[in-house]
Image (cartoon, rainbow, N blue to C red):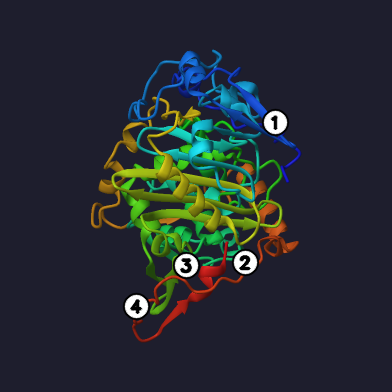
């Protein structure tokens, strides 16, 4: 079920970003043939009509590149929910039904996916092979942590020590168990964020930018940098928050950026990692994403689930030099990874055989472009690149740099936790599909329940 309300406000993009243009996308004619089956609209781009409408043939889209050209309305980023935002990637992306080349439907019909929105796209060429309600606004659940990681990995020294605030430590449900006043290594927090979806690690990393408010502003600014105009992030861990939304298309843009970041892929593809909760007290984190070991070519992804968002998922796979992205929102519980596997199977079978229905636009040119250049995050996250430092979170020390907005957000988060928000993201059982963790050192405990926590 789609979230009904829109956010009351949208994070304002800085003047530098506001003057930048939006990447030109391949024009896709909105009048391409559309047929309706029952209550679901299916937009079908036929070969001749696609050529007449300017849709590139299979394999013809260029590799991702940063461009200053624009087909967006002048004056800055499109507003959340606007037609301009819904048409990013091509006019067919504004459809709220299934959009696919009928040639593909004839040769290999799309699988029936039990989700309100999804996208299957080629990460290398940017081609959107098929989609359903790609710009529809839905809750992200823990898939929002991909954006949090993409934003913060280039900004934080992996060897720095972050002192957890009371707010970070208060994220009781689905956490790693941070303790207020204790210091934790940034690289360990990223492992907790992406392996077991630790909600407290997400808050600690966000606050490590200087304050919770500053970190959230950076996360939303990164979404605008990626042209993900459907994103309105309120909490870095994706737990339910009023007005917090994303789209399957924007999830694909964010996933494509993640694929270009070696440090992200290293964290995301790690099967097991040790986390030191306090001196000499270790737990073993086990990756939740069984696509890594059970799906041929699986290279990464992120699981999410809350009551309001239902199941959400980002899946990444590579075969024979082709990398595909599958994003799924508001899916029937416990079927999100299976659904992604079916979309990926379809995508690998039909890639290069069908006309794309849209394109994943590249990031805008900005001051952060250099930080996101290939290899930049890998260098920043190279072990021993800089001497370790300790970051004390402003939000944990009143008067030390946090602003009123940061404290208000923190207070809101604590109140939500007290009201039992953890129950909205309750544990779900999965059979253990990942390899067993390696033998643990004496005194090390296994955080096996991390497999089941979103």
In the image, residue 365 above or below residue 412:
above
Considering only order in the chain, which callout, 4 or 2, is on the residue closer to the N terminus?
2
In the rendered image, which quarter contains the C terminus? bottom right
Circles 3, 2 touching at the beta carbon (< 8 Å): no
Neighbor class of circle 3 (other Cα within 10 Å; few <14, some 14-19, many 20+) is some
Q: Residue at x 41, y 59 (%)?
A: 295
The Cα atoms of the two marked residues, 4 and 1, are separated by: 53 Å
**Disc 3 target residue:** 182
Query: Closer to the camera: disc 2 or disc 4?
Result: 4
Considering only order in the chain, which callout, 2 or 3, is on the residue closer to the N terminus?
2
Q: Residue at x 66, y 66 (%)?
A: 426
In the image, residue 75 above or below residue 152:
above
- Asked whether the viewer can see residue 207, the reply is no
Report x, y in % for residue 109.
Answer: 54, 42
Circles 2, 4 touching at the beta carbon (< 8 Å): no
Report x, y in % for residue 181.
Answer: 50, 65
Which disc, if any, is residue 36? 1
Report x, y in % for residue 219.
Answer: 51, 41
Query: Closer to the camera: disc 4 or disc 3?
Result: 4
Q: Nearer the viewer, residue 175 or 439?
A: 439
Q: Nearer the viewer, residue 449 or 107?
A: 107
**Disc 2 target residue:** 173
Neighbor class of circle 4 (other Cα within 10 Å; few <14, some 14-19, many 20+) is few
Q: In the current view of this chain or complex, which residue is farthest to the front?
A: 106
Q: Mark 1: which secondary structure?
A: strand
Name the quadrant containing residue 3.
Answer: top right
Which disc, if any, is residue 438? 4
Name the quadrant containing residue 85.
Answer: top right
Considering only order in the chain, which callout, 3 or 4, is on the residue closer to the N terminus?
3
The Cα atoms of the two marked residues, 2 and 4, are separated by: 26 Å
Considering only order in the chain, which callout, 1 or 4, is on the residue closer to the N terminus?
1
């Amino acid at each position: 079920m789609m979230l009904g309300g829109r956010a009351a406000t949208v994070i304002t993009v800085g003047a530098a970003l506001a003057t930048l243009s939006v990447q030109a996308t391949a024009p896709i004619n909105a009048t391409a043939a559309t047929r309706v089956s029952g209550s679901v609209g299916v937009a079908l781009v036929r070969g001749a009509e696609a050529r007449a409408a300017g849709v590139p043939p299979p394999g013809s889209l260029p590799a991702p590149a940063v461009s200053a050209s624009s087909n967006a309305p002048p004056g800055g980023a499109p507003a959340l929910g606007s037609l301009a935002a819904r048409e990013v990637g091509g006019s067919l992306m504004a459809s709220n039904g299934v959009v696919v080349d009928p040639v593909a439907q004839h040769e290999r019909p799309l699988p029936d996916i039990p989700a309100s929105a999804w996208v299957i796209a080629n990460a290398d060429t940017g081609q959107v092979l098929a989609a359903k309600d790609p710009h529809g606004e839905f809750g992200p659940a823990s898939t929002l942590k991909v954006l949090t990681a993409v934003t913060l990995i280039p900004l934080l020294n992996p060897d720095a020590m972050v002192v957890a605030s009371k707010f970070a430590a208060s994220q009781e449900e689905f956490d790693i168990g941070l303790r207020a006043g204790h210091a934790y290594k940034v690289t360990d927090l990223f492992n907790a964020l992406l392996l077991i979806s630790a909600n407290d690690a997400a808050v600690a990393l966000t606050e490590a930018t200087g304050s919770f408010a500053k970190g959230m502003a950076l996360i939303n600014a990164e979404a605008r940098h990626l042209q993900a105009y459907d994103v309105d992030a309120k909490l870095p861990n994706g737990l339910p928050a009023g007005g917090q939304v994303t789209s399957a298309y924007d999830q694909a843009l964010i996933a494509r950026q993640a694929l270009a970041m070696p440090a992200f892929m290293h964290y995301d593809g790690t099967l097991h990692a040790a986390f030191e909760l306090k001196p000499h007290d270790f737990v073993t984190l086990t990756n939740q994403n069984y696509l890594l070991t059970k799906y041929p070519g699986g290279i990464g992804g992120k699981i999410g689930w809350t009551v309001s968002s239902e199941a959400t998922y980002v899946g990444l796979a590579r075969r024979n030099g082709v990398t595909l992205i599958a994003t799924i929102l508001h899916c029937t519980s416990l079927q999100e990874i299976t659904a992604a596997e079916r979309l990926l199977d379809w995508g690998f079978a039909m890639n290069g055989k069908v006309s794309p229905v849209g394109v994943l636009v590249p990031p805008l040119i900005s001051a952060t472009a250099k930080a996101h250049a290939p290899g930049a995050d890998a260098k920043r996250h190279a072990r021993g690149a800089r001497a370790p430092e300790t970051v004390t979170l402003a939000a944990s020390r009143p008067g030390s740099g946090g602003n009123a907005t940061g404290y208000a957000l923190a207070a809101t988060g604590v109140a939500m936790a007290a009201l039992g928000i953890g129950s909205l993201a309750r544990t779900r059982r999965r059979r253990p599909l990942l390899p067993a963790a390696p033998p643990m050192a004496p005194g090390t405990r296994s955080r096996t329940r991390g497999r089941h926590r979103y």
